[in-house]
Image: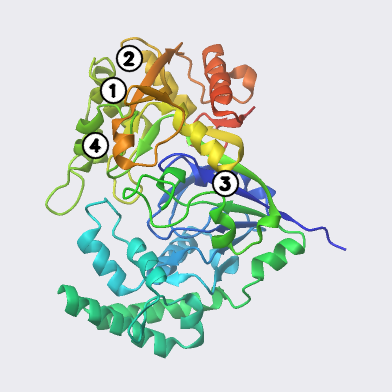
Amino acid sequence: MTAQGFADVLIGTQYGDEGKARVADGKAKEYDVIARFNGGANAGHTIVHDGKSIALHQVPSGIFYKNTSMYIGSGCVINISKLDEELENLKKSGIDARERLHISSQASVIQPHHLAIDANIGSTIGTTKNGIGPAYADRALRMWGERVLNIRMGDLQNDPDTYFRMMRANFEAMAALHGYTADIDSELAEMKKDFEAIAPLIEKDTLFLQKKVMGGAKVLFEGAQAFMLDVVKGLVPYVTSSGTTAAAAYGGGDLSPDCHRKTIGVAKVIMSRVGHGPFPSEFGGMQSEEYCMKANADGSPMYGKAVEAAYDVDALLASSDPFDVGKAIRVLSGEYGTTTTRPRRIGVFDLVQLSHAVKINGIKSLVLTKCDLLQAYSRTKNGMIPLVTGYELDGEMIDYVPASLNAYQRVKPIIEYREGFTEDIKNAKNPSDLPSALKKVLKEIEERAGCAVEGIGVGSDREEYVTL
């Protein structure tokens, strides 16, 4: 009799862009299935594998391993046309992911009216205008009169004519209500064509993944977005539209919690955040947030990657203004949106926030990415590594992330400095190759987070990694 398999959950512990895909890619060979349980095409991430850079949006990581299957769970919302395009782009790169990709029949479809709504109201929060939020909202609303709002992949698979007509009705109703305009005929025609290519990948068996694990399969759940953007646990309204906690993996990933083995957290020592929202450790505070969110008339970022590439990094690092230091760190670490090239807001590594994430998610081990970038602090005025070691709220010390947006905006981070290092660690292979100053910082991170660090990223490539 085949022994039952298990599932591990890999989540970002901060505000996204922690390098989850890179970590998942490195671990993929240990698992039979890499599965997504939340989000949609709003999450862009890049994997560098054997010198080849691949941008993924809806396809799970693990694409480079021919014996690894991929699964998009019911907790996801799917942009059919973008998924088909992504699969075609992978094929052009020599990767035929269609042979190994399975899609839950219970995953919801992003419809034309979802894109229209997001384009019109998403700018306030800073969404990527991919229709994710409106699709999740319709999942909760379910129906409007006689119209089904939550159309799922299995619905289109079983009765495409009826549900494509329903999509048209949904768009026309929203257009009449809000004055939206679009060439709906062309959009639906393109969507139908793309769906024909996607339909064979839809799993009719709602116990597909459960049966896999019962048969001995090992699953890695790969979270999109990150813990601090959870629709409930995050700082509402500046959050994503889905559940991003480790617990959400089982409902959205179509697997019993009995299969859980452990949760792995990914944290980036050069913290970043996209869009509006509280970020206590941000270099430059509100000035940085406003700068990063400025856009040109066409919606492109005013201070995107190309603009900042011309900055004098050494001069910025030597500045007494934290806002300048943040800009320099962003240029050195390449912290820009994968899709938008929008500058990400940069902050000091926050150990209070990390400890909070570890406790809520039951994280047993951590992977820390971009540790090589800590060397940049040796070029600042004091040459030391900053760490947020405490929070002060209204004159009192706290050890948690407040639930209230207003309260979190009032938090004053306590920043302490630790010895920096000048060594380039990109070629480090073993713990003995690491500077003593970095080892001390890693030990403090473990102690304050209450969790072991299993490994660190020392460069952008998957092989640039040190197992501790």
Q: Which label's residue is closer to the chain start, 4 or 3? A: 3
Kind of residue sitting beneath label 3: Leu
Please give the residue where the numbered disc 1 appears in the rendered image.
Answer: 325
Name the disc covering residue 380, or none. Answer: 2
Residue 189's image quarter? bottom left
| Residue 461 appears in the rendering | no
Measure how far apart labels 1 and 3 are at the Cα level: 31 Å
Would you say the residues marked 1 and 4 are in contact, meaning their CB atoms lie under 8 Å apart? no
Between disc 1 and disc 3, whose residue precedes?
3
The CA span between labels 3 and 2 is 34 Å
Q: Looking at the image, do the residues carrying marks 2 and 1 touch, with CB atoms under 8 Å apart?
A: yes
- Which residue does the numbered mark 3 point to in the structure image? 10
Where is residue 117 drawn, in percent x and y?
25, 67
Q: Nearer the viewer, mark 2 or mark 4?
A: 4
Q: How many residues crowd mark 3 within 10 Å: few (<14), some (14–19), many (20+)?
A: many
Seen from this angle, which residue lies furthest left? 297
Secondary-structure class at tag 2? loop
Q: Position of residue 300 (x, y in %)?
A: 20, 50
Q: Which mark is residue 449?
A: none
Q: Amino acid at mark 2?
A: Thr
Q: Quadrant of the C terminus?
A: top right
The residue positioned 46% from the left and 60% from the top of the image is 58
Residue 51: x %, y % from top left: 50, 42
Residue 73 seen in this snapshot: yes
Foreground residue among 70 and 164: 164
Which quadrant holds the N terminus? bottom right
Provide residue 112's location: percent of width, then percent of height: 30, 74
Q: On the picture, is 378 further left or further right than 155?
A: left
Q: Secondary structure at mark 3?
A: strand
Residue occupying image coordinates x 70% and y 55%: 259
